Image (cartoon, rainbow, N blue to C red):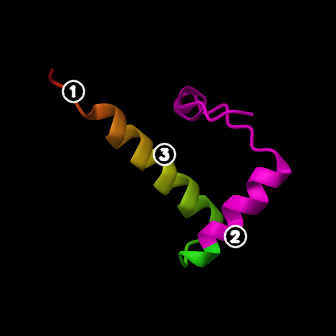
Amino acid sequence: MPYNPNLYRSKNIYLPNELCDKAEQRASDQYMNFSTYVRHLIVRDIESTKKVHII
């Protein structure tokens, strides 16, 4: 399933088991628990969408 930030924003989060396993491993590598890591990803995504690109 491709990453879709709108799913996070609407709270309809579906994470396949394999993705959960990878996220839990990355979270433990960064000394975070799973929910903290997911929040970290959501905040990072929201911050990146706030940036205005001026041409």
Residue 13 in the image: x percent, y percent?
Answer: 68, 37
- Residue range of the region highlighted in magenta in the rendering: 1-27
The secondary element bearing badge 1 is classed as loop
Mark 1 nearby-residue class (10 Å; few <14, some 14–19, many ≥20): few
Residue lying furthest top in this view? 55
Which residue occupies the extreme right position in the image? 17
Q: Which mark sits nearer the N-terminus, 3 or 1?
A: 3
Give the structural element (helix, strand or loop) at label 2: helix
Which amino acid, by three-letter code, is at mark 2?
Gln
Q: CA distance from mark 1 to mark 2?
A: 34 Å
Tell me which numbered mark, 1 or 2, is placed earlier along the sequence: 2
Looking at the picture, tell me which residue is in the foreground, 15 or 55.
Answer: 55
| Location of residue 24 with respect to 53 vertically, above or below | below
Which quadrant holds residue 16?
A: top right
Residue 53 x, y percent position in the rendering: 21, 27
- Front-most of residues 39 and 5: 5
Secondary structure, mark 3, is helix
* Residue behind mark 1: 53
Query: Left or right of 47: which side holds 7?
Result: right
Residue 10 belongs to the span the image colors magenta: yes
Q: Is residue 37 above or below residue 3?
A: below
Mark 3 — residue?
42
Q: Quadrant of the C terminus?
A: top left
First of labels 2, 3 by sequence position: 2
**Which residue bears the numbered disc 2?**
25
